[in-house]
Amino acid sequence: MTPRPVLTPKTIKTLATFAQNLLDHDSLIRRLLRGLGWVTLTPLMLLRKLPQVFAAGCVLLLAYSILGTGGLVLLLVLPLITWVMWRLAHPESAEQVAARVRRRRRYRRIYRKHWPTIAAGCGLSIPGAFGRQVAPELIGVTAYPGADALHVRLLAGQSPADYADRADALAHAFGSPQVRVRSDQPGTVTLLFSTGDMLTEPIPAMLLDAQDADFEALPVGLTEDGSPYRLRLLYSHVLTAGATGSGKGSALWSTVRALAPSVPSGVVELWGADPKGGIELAMGRALFSRFTADDEPGDMVQLVNDAADLVRQRSKRLRGHSRKHVPTAEEPFVVLIIDELAYLTDYQDDTKFKHQFNKALKVVLSQGRAAGVSVLAFVQDPRKSVVDARNLFPTKVALRLDTASEVEMVLGKDAWERGAHAEAIPEAQPGTGYVLVDGDPTPVRIRFTWVEDDDIRAMARDYPAPPPAPPRHGFTVVTDGDDQDDDTTGEVA
Ligand SMILES: Nc1ncnc2c1ncn2[C@@H]1O[C@H](COP(=O)(O)OP(=O)(O)OP(=O)(O)O)[C@@H](O)[C@H]1O
């Protein structure tokens, strides 16, 4: 028996029809194959692009197969009911979770998606293979209530200054009112995009803390991410500049308030010089161990001279024993508060007075930090001649100022380029400013708390300075020429 040929004319005709059908776009076979592909590939696509949706679909299918329709409906409705009950019972925690979810969505939709294009547009990418642009790696995003922080790994050859130069372009590209550049660790940079202003509302005075205060981290206000701002005063000096009505008073009293609980024990001594006749400081007079608000400038010179003498004595004692003075009730942390520095350093006609004052102030500024004597000074006019000593202040604060050049006079050009636009602070937001601390090029936007007159009176009543003890600092003027360092002879202004 001869075998039947596999390819009979009939088989060939069937195959030809099948092939024609395959080629025909609208044929049944093509449609069936397309359907099959869709059914098998869609879950794979979902798994890759939207893993959460895929997982949710699997759970629902599983629930349906195990629990049936009723169970499936329950499974769908239960989270909704739980969410509504949560919102009703604990609206704050529910809002926190919702905000976190919103922020994560924003991170994915805005930053992750657009970062490569925006980095290239702002000139922060480098050319890669095949004409592609290589963007700096976006390591992650931290969402704070008032700002999003983008952590970016620097490309070889880049520095945070390159990002500071492009800060304006970056802010516009991401639709943020402002971006500030922070360099936290080598090789990375943090870009802080404002997403809303946490500092628009006045911040009430901090609760007085009866515990021993940390004088290197005094809570005086809030930063723009809503966290407390802690000011270093011990082993530092702070210069605050601001136009009239910018809130210098709140900077002063927020700091005094953080120190006040340590005043009655004598661990902190406040010395106040208010050349404007006591308008600012007199309300809290009882807090001050030494106070001069006379129009008579001689008293101010005496006060700063005494501070300089104390610094010299302590420095002499510290020499060879310790590098830093630790405040105690016997040897307190002395804070010399000068309300309007320009009045004493610049506006005086009497050159002899100016010379004496500047000489003593320079001793305190150059040697006082280690000796536990800090200066907290305020100026309205930041012209160079007024604050020529600003480099001796490790911490500088620019409240609202009139022009960008004034900001540069106080904080330096680099800080302005990094976003410290103190000239743009709204008049309606007194107490807001930028802080720059030596060693950290990133200005921090903060708002000082608002200490009301009643709060000041209550502080003065509850935390008065102890009565003067017999001389314990030995305020006798040190005349030993050997103890006076060369740099005590210079002028401040
Ligand atoms: N931190 C703050 N929060 C809310 N309001 C404030 C704050 N600081 C100041 N203010 C408001 O602004 C006004 C002016 O503030 P302040 O007197 O401290 O400014 P200043 O810079 O000391 O002005 P001047 O140089 O004219 O004395 C205050 O009376 C108060 O109403």
Image (spheres, rainbow, N blue to C red):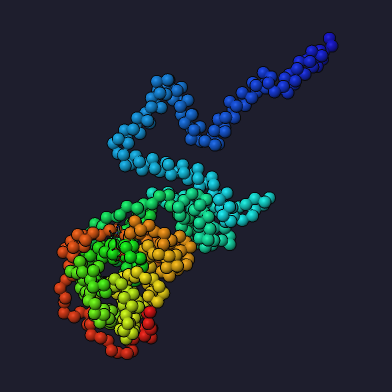
Image point (25%, 63%), residue name: 257
Residue at 33% across / 41% down in the picture? 93
Q: Residue at x 45, y 54 (%)?
A: 178
Name which quarter of the figure residue 447 lies in.
bottom left
Out of 452 and 184, give the one closest to the viewer: 452
Residue at image x 39%, y 64%? 401
Residue 21 at x, y percent in the picture? 72, 19
Q: Is residue 326 above or below residue 74?
A: below
Q: Toward the viewer: 375 or 358?
A: 358
Say above or below: 488 vs 333. below
Please identify the quarter of the rendering in which residue 482 is found.
bottom left
State the image quarter where residue 331 is shown: bottom left
Q: Quadrant of ligand 1?
A: bottom left
Residue 28, percent from left and from top:
67, 18
Q: Nearer the viewer, residue 71 or 298?
A: 298
Please state if 86 lies on the left or on the right of 183 as rendered. left
Q: Evaluate whether residue 213 shows in this view.
A: no
Question: From this viewpoint, which residue is outermost toward the right?
Answer: 2
The mark tally for this picture is 0
Q: Quadrant of the C terminus?
A: bottom left
Look at the image and tell me whether residue 46 can be seen.
Answer: yes
Question: Which residue occupies the foreground of this view, 242 or 68?
Answer: 242
Relative height, residue 15 to residue 317 (above, below): above
Q: Position of residue 259 (x, y in %)?
A: 25, 65
> Residue 249 vs residue 30: left or right?
left
Residue 395: x %, y % from top left: 37, 68
Which quarter shows the N terminus?
A: top right
Q: Is the residue 329 above or below the residue 76 in the image?
A: below
